[in-house]
Amino acid sequence: MTGSAADTTPTRLEEELAALAGSVPDPELPVLSLTELGVLRGVRMLESGAVEVALTPTYTGCPAIEAMAADIERVLHEHGIPEVSVHTVLSPAWSTDDISAEGRRKLAEFGIAPPRPHAAEGPVPVTLSVRCPHCGSTDTELLSRFSSTACKALRRCVSCREPFDHFKEL
């Protein structure tokens, strides 16, 4: 959603606006920016001076999408963009593969087991274990399919006995 219909290359201004919009923290996981979460799909500057932002929710009906849109609008308004519209884009659907490597690192550092990436190529893992973000053990157990948000499960490490959230693979 960058550049004109004939030219999909983002302009320098669009790249700067995307960096601003993408720096907004996720309202449910403020340790991650929207760029790191992978939900910011694009920013386009219109000839009128208005800015359109494309945002994909982590799942259809995600209640955080409204807060994300409001935060993006606020940040861009604060940087002199008077007219901002945020559009929800459902296709292609968001996947946990959209979380950046930095986002995965931050989740683990924050105590949330990051989702396992889908194997694009190479061997398929034969284990369904989730690594404990506290001690690194793969001996973990599911306590609840849902945690503080629908996209996370609550698990406990059998080794260190610490409970932790696991960002579910989608």
Image: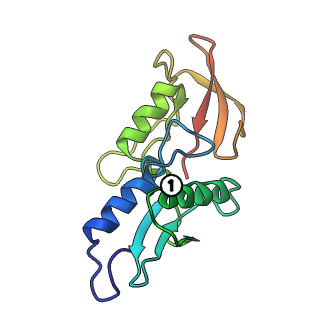
x, y percentage for residue 133? 50, 23
163 or 86: nearer the viewer = 86
Q: Count numbered badges in the picture.
A: 1
For the point 65% across and 27% down, the residue is 155
134 or 140: nearer the viewer = 134
Instruction: Quickly name the residue at label 1.
Output: 75
x, y percentage for residue 6? 29, 89
For the point 64% across and 40% down, the residue is 152
Specify the quadrant that holds the N terminus.
bottom left
Give the residue type at disc 1: Val
Q: Is residue 76 above or below residue 153?
A: below
For the point 62% across and 15% down, the residue is 162
Examine the image and state in which quarter residue 10 appears.
bottom left
For the point 51% across and 27% down, the residue is 110
Q: Is residue 92 above or below residue 153?
A: below
Judge the density around disc 1: few (<14), some (14-19), many (≥20) Cα neighbours within 10 Å.
some
Q: Is residue 51 above or below residue 5?
A: above
The residue positioned farthest toward the top in the image shown: 160
x, y percentage for residue 135? 48, 15
34 or 15: nearer the viewer = 15
x, y percentage for residue 64? 66, 53
